[in-house]
Image: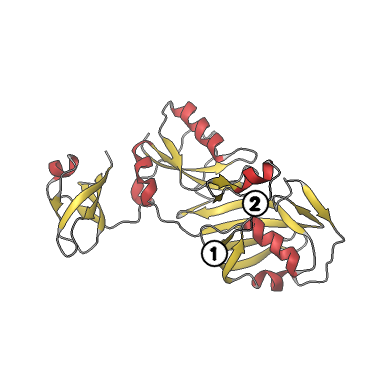
Amino acid sequence: MNGIIVINKPANMTSLDVIACLRRRYKQKKFGHAGTLDPMATGVMVVLAGTATKILPYIQDTDKQYIASIQLGAKYDTDDVFGQIEQEAQIHTDFDFEAVLKTFIGKQHQKVPKASAKKIQGKKMYEYLREGLEVPDVYTDIEIYDVSVIDQQELSFSIDCSSGTYIRSVCRDFGQKTNNLAAMKSLVRTKANGFSIEQAQDLDAQEHVVYPINKLLNLPEIQAPEPDRIRNGQTVQLDCDDDLVLVMDQGENLAIYKRKYEGKNWFSCERGLR
């Protein structure tokens, strides 16, 4: 199998669990994914199979969409209800759910959850937490484009955001804005890397749809002037304005080529795709 498949990740599985299942099913080792999901989360997980794994370094971070819900009354070490309770408090309900959600729209410096995979001095933050060590405060720049209410009683909402946004942090910070302790109760990723939840298939689907890498690789496409030289990874002249291109031959993806000299039309092979 070579190409992209879109899985609706089940709950209680890590992203690596999903990859392991696909390796067993299709009896091939080359599988990777274009963005991890927490074990408790479900939804869109974009998987690269076979030669498609070669494009992973060239995939640009893309915007995401999620559906999430909030639980009030307790603070967890993971900022979701699947961690350890650190503190409990009375619930305050004197807030306008939609109005508070709208305050999150825009660019912000978001505090990363302590139980994240972000590394500090070569060590993942959740490893500090597991070892009982103090977890340093870490922040990341993100943008939230839109937030809308789904169910006010359940405190569920839909959110469109930049890649790298932590929805657990949004839920935690919602508590701070409403004089509550809060954590994320559920999470479904509904859009990622240009694919939607409607395109996502069950892990055990009878047959998975395989998409070409062009659906994920956002590069200009150019017809190979000398296909054999491209197949051999040789430097060639390409008549184009872009510095990084996908070189093709009659619909076949051959390689990613990069401009070798500024202002010159000589390109060298960055990554063969055959």
Q: Nearer the viewer, mark 1 or mark 2?
A: 1
Three-letter code for the amino acid on which mark 1 is drawn: Ile
**Residue drawn at point x = 73 percent, y = 57 percent:** 70
Asked if marks 1 and 2 touch (Cβ < 8 Å), the reply is no
Q: Can you say whether 210 is above or below 219 in the image?
A: above
**Which residue bears the numbered disc 2?**
187
Please identify the quarter of the rendering in which residue 38 is found.
top right
| Residue sticking out furthest to the right | 90
Instruction: Decide if residue 65 is on the left or right side of residue 265.
Output: right
> Residue 171's spot in the image, x, y percent?
69, 60
**Which residue bears the numbered disc 1?**
142
> Residue 234's spot in the image, x, y percent?
15, 44
Instruction: Decide if residue 107 is on the left or right side of residue 236.
Output: right
Q: Quadrant of the N terminus?
A: top left
**Label 1: which secondary element:** strand
**Residue drawn at point x = 54 percent, y = 50 percent:** 197
